[in-house]
Amino acid sequence: ADFTTGARPVKAARGTELTAKSWQTEAPLRMLMNNLDPEVAERPDDLVVYGGTGRAVRSWAAFDAITRTLETMEKDETLLVQSGKPVGVFRTHEWAPRVLLANSNLVGDWATWPEFRRLEAEGLMMYGQMTAGSWIYIGTQGILQGTYETFAAVGNKLAAEGRHPAPAAEGSTEGPLAGTLTLTGGCGGMGGAQPLAVTLNDGACLIVDVDETRLRRRAGKRYLDEVETDLDAAIKKVQAAKDERRGWSVGYVGNAAEVFPELLRRHKAGEVTFDVVTDQTSAHDPLSYLPEGITVAEWHVEAAADPEGFTKKAQASMARQVQAMVEFQDAGAEVFDYGNSIRDEARTGGYERAFEFPGFVPAYIRPLFCEGLGPFRWVALSGDPEDIAVTDKAIKELFPENKHLHKWLDAAAERVEFEGLPARICWLGYGERAKAGLLFNQLVKEGKVKAPIVIGRDHLDSGSVASPYRETESMADGSDAVADWPLLNALINTSSGATWVSIHHGGGVGIGRSLHAGQVSVADGTDLAAEKLERLLTNDPGMGVIRHVDAGYDRAVEVANERGVRIPMNETASTR
């Protein structure tokens, strides 16, 4: 398919003047366009938002049809989008979503990369990633806060196990990674959050990427402190930052499959000591991982000419990188998979020890999921950064005791550069999200912000994903691959007042490995929006609580009992 035909710069409207007939259709229109803003998208001319292949729509013709349709829809109509192509509009009702999206979904036996690529080449579907094809990507900040939470948990674990460098003096405000050095790979749309997440936790970070332009882009947005093309110089800089207990990040231009083994050699020789090792290259799609021996300039030509051969070369290189990661763990480093399926690709590439280090969710995040905690993001449709400042202040006042949340919001306000429409993200749990949504709606109603606010989340949430190599890896009851939960999540959100709902396949781990659902709502200041937000933002994180209750997690049972989440199998006739 020729994605570049008709390519043009796209930028969402700002202000209060409507192009569509209501804010409930104006919001998805602006958010779709925001996904393709050159400030936001990786390759907007190809309609790719992030993750190498994650598109907002299937073609420019589909983009034109979707935008035209959203501009003309009534308040009781619903647009259906099949893998990035608008296929119908039906009359529903005001409580129904204005848009329902399904992306990349294939029947089990056909859920393979070759079959997907055949269908994609024939123009029959597209890869939606998570928030690309559901129009709620907000740039690198979208993954930054979850990455910040993950690295904080890593530092806390190292300290708890006595593997952390000497603790800071009493009363110090040092972050949990102070005095540590992290090695990672991949500085694209998702991985680009890693260096800033490490430095916000006061750690030093060396991040490797084959594409210098990606590193330069992240440095330009202040997610990365500097770029280095000399490995000795890069090591010297991050080692100095580690020794000084100072947050600092250096991006090194190189292929992780070659650089990780070399750094392992130096680590073993005592030339440098890495405390944490991970990776967030686009390994979920082997065509988006550059094998050794192929230049960046040759990359896309080689991948297109021989996808199967390129895949095998990529998997062999991934095997080499993952072998180095396992051996870093053998040598005492904290090592984890950051959700890109690199372990399985490395195993396919012939490395049998690939799964000897854990995924980040079972290692650090699952206790948060048991409370319905997860990524809560919002976007100011006015386009005015001051509206985000107002919401930041309001959230801090709403949750005065949550100092960890306050630290994140203060750091984000100081360090995060907006990409496209101004947005913010923070992690909130069951009960908290509904309070925040109602507060935002009140801010709109009272005119304290200049236009409505879009509220959404990542698909990587507590009850919205079935992904055995990531969110549902090593579930307590062995239900890793049970995919009913994201489908139930989409159904309950559709029934609870969401403005748009999506069901995707593949996400950040690849075809055949994940099903996940997303929801987005609009706080437009109306009483109807308040009713919808209260139900939606209670029920959506509630899915995370019931998912983990069902899997047998004691903390989830406690949360359900404490906060009144009804679990039929835990009731007796006398309890109701």
Image (spheres, helix red, strand yellow):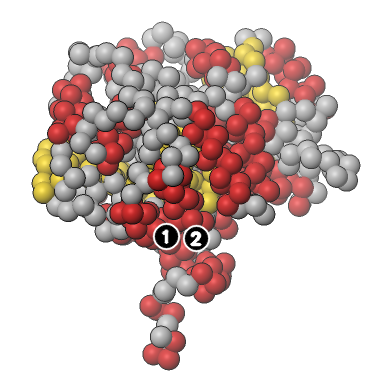
Q: Please, what secondary structure does the residue beneath circle 2 have?
A: loop
181 and 497: which is toward the camera = 497
Residue 271 locus on image (x, y percent): 78, 23
Q: Which residue is mark 2?
A: 431
Q: Quadrant of residue 382?
A: top left
Residue 273 locus on image (x, y percent): 76, 30
394 and 25: which is toward the camera = 394
Numbered circle sitting on residue 344: none
Left/right of residue 300 with respect to residue 260 in the rendered view: left
Left/right of residue 164 with respect to residue 506 in the rendered view: right
Q: Residues within 10 Å of mark 1 (few under 14, many from 20)?
A: many
179 and 545: which is toward the camera = 545
Question: Residue at left 31%, top 19%?
Answer: 10
Q: Is residue 40 visible?
A: yes
Q: Residue furthest front?
A: 446
Q: Please, what secondary structure does the residue beneath circle 1 have?
A: helix
Label 1 amino acid? Thr
Residue 408 locus on image (x, y percent): 63, 40
Q: How many marks?
A: 2
- Above or below, 340 relative to 436: above
Question: Residue at left 20%, top 21%?
Answer: 60
- Above or below, 325 relative to 303: below
Q: Image quadrant for the C terminus?
A: bottom left
Q: Image quadrant for the N terminus?
A: top left
Q: Is residue 257 visible?
A: no
Q: Which residue is mark 1?
A: 538
Marks 2/1 in contact by CB < 8 Å: the verdict is yes
Q: Earlier in the sequence, mark 2 or mark 1?
A: 2
